[in-house]
Image: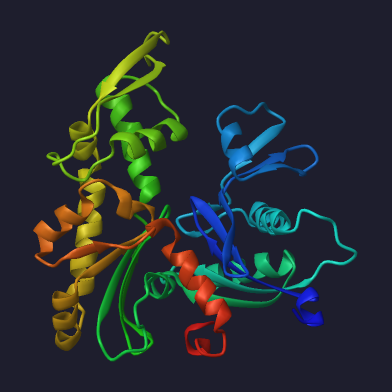
Amino acid sequence: MSFFSFLTQEIAIDLGTANTIIIYNGKVVVDEPSVVTIDTKTEKLIAIGEKARQMQGKTHSNLKTIRPLRDGVIADFNAAEQMIRGMIKMINPKKRFFAPALKMVICIPSGSTEVEIRAVRDSAEHAGGRDVYMIYEPMAAAIGIGLDVEAPEGNMVVDIGGGTTEIAVISLGGIVTNKSIRIAGDDLTADIMEHMRHQHNVKIGERTAEEIKIVVGSAMTELDDPPPDMIVKGPNQMTAMPIDVHVTYTEIAHCLDKSISKIETAITNALEHTPPELYADIYKRGIWLAGGGALLRGLDKRLYEKFNIPFRIAEDPLRAVARGTGVALKNVDKFSFLLR
């Protein structure tokens, strides 16, 4: 280890709407929910990550739980800066005499505007970043999956995150066709909350809806290996009395159908704009699924039945983008043409 390694710290950040992952020295050192709790009177950071998530929906008037990112972009600049700074501190809990200069690679949605990109860059620089590079999420996902993005062949990636679904066709180190839609994991969670309110007359919070999605969430009404029913407890909207509701994967599949159909439409749109030679490659090689949404039961099968193209779930899809961002960090010179 050289002397200069103490002066500069190289980190890769997957700044996600739902989770933020930080890679340092080739290892995942931080994997926390993208949530902060702030004291409204002093504007001080009270909790971050999992600790803040546990406070969600349980705070009093002096505390505010914030998700700094919405739809893949920064919605609260101050909270985002505090979150990035706090998570970077988790890498080195021990106090140093000086803070090392930070070299960062951060992934961003492919549909980001210049203003949104500037907001991420400013937040990173205010959190101590000296050299800040950006890479588009579908490109990072492709690298993280292990695809040769520089090869003269078509690779298609569908990255279903918390705030956005990124769909891209990649060839020769560039994005040939891309579609970024703001329908993703958060919308599926919102669908479940709405369904429970209308269908069962029970009010549930975001955390409970997220749990339902993980435990009994499904993209298909018929599964080969169905999960057991889940019992959800909550207040009746009319009487405020507690009730227990049995939730099945079939009814959740029905309530998620509309949002999944929008993702299917976006994939269709991306395929329509794909050049024929690359389309042939995709048909032969299949389409890769990454992000937390890839874990939804039966999604790969449903998409295969819709498009008649094999859909493959990436190994550890939740961290595919983070892994690719880490590879880009290690090879900044090699992948300079991919970075902004």
Residue, far right: 97
Q: Residue 137, percent across and down? A: 43, 69
Look at the image and tell me whether residue 231 can be seen.
yes
The residue at the point 24 percent across, 63 percent down is 312
State left or right for residue 96 relative to residue 302.
Answer: right
Report whether 235 appears left or right of 188. right
- Above or below, 38 relative to 111: above
Answer above or below: position of 232 versus 81. above
On the rendered image, what quadrant is the N terminus found in?
bottom right
Q: Please tell me in which quadrant of the rendered image residue 127 appears.
A: bottom right
Position in image of residue 218 (x %, y %): 24, 42
Quadrant location, the C terminus = bottom right
Image color mode: rainbow
Counting the numbered discs, the total is: 0
Please name whichever residue, 60 or 101, is drawn nearer the observer in this view of the structure.
101
Nearest to the observer: residue 82 or residue 119: 82
Q: Is residue 113 something that shows in the picture? A: no
Left or right, residue 228 beside residue 182: left
Tell me what residue is drawn at x 21 percent, y 39 percent: 253
Residue found at x 59% / y 78%:
133
Residue 157: horizontal and vertical position, in percent? 30, 70
Left or right: 49 as drawn, with respect to 129: left
Q: Is residue 279 above or below residue 89?
A: below
Residue closer to the observer: 294 or 44: 294
Give the quarter of the image for residue 37. top right
